[in-house]
Image: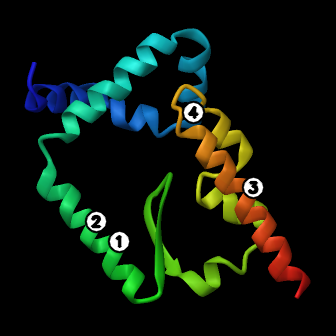
Amino acid sequence: MNSEQAKQIIEACEIDRMLEDPEEVICLEQNNPELLGAYRAFLNLGKECEPDKQEKFRDYVLEQEKKGKVVIMTFDGLRETKLDDFVKQPIQGLLYDLNRDAATVLTFIDDKKWVNDYAVMQVITRLKSMVEKE
């Protein structure tokens, strides 16, 4: 199987949309973690055929940063907002929007990256609390 074939299957079965739904991911983790791993591997293979799209996306995010904005992925798609405004929200909203609240981070426990994501949650929480005390 090549990356183009994987992409076609991903689109036909809407695997990418399924893995964006936290409830679906939790259900798969609990009932069929091997299938979840296979879906994620499939997505990675499918993305290999889209380097131009990934580069454009990266460039867009970096360009927004230069404008003082942050770009996040939501259930409705991309959202950009002024970074200064974004960090003013309460900590729970901030972590939720960044997918770094404890509940979200712990749903990806099969990926070793969860440890650093959890540490990021702790650091952001501490820093936000320190800033609010000033």
Which residue: 41% across, 81% down?
65
What amino acid type should be assigned to the residue bearing mark 1? Val
In the rendered image, which residue does mark 1 sit on? 61
Mark earlier in primary sequence (2, 3): 2
- x and y percentages locating residue 74 in the rendered image: 50, 56
* Residue 41 or residue 90, whichever sits in front: 41
Which residue: 85% across, 81% down?
132
What whole-number distance in Å separates the C-alpha atoms at marks 2 and 3? 26 Å
In the rendered image, which residue does mark 4 sit on? 108
Mark earlier in primary sequence (4, 1): 1
Note whether 113 is above or below 122 in the view shown: above
In the rendered image, which residue does mark 2 sit on? 58
- For the C terminus, the quadrant is bottom right
Residue 134 as seen in the image, left or right of residue 82: right
Q: Quadrant of residue 30?
A: top right
In the rendered image, which residue does mark 3 sit on? 122
Q: Secondary structure at mark 4?
A: loop
Please name the colour scheme applied to the rendered image.
Answer: rainbow
Q: Which of the two discs, 3 and 1, sits closer to the camera?
A: 3
Note whether 35 is above or below 20 in the view shown: above
Residue 39 as seen in the image, left or right of residue 34: left
Q: Mark 1 touching mark 2, by CB under 8 A? A: yes
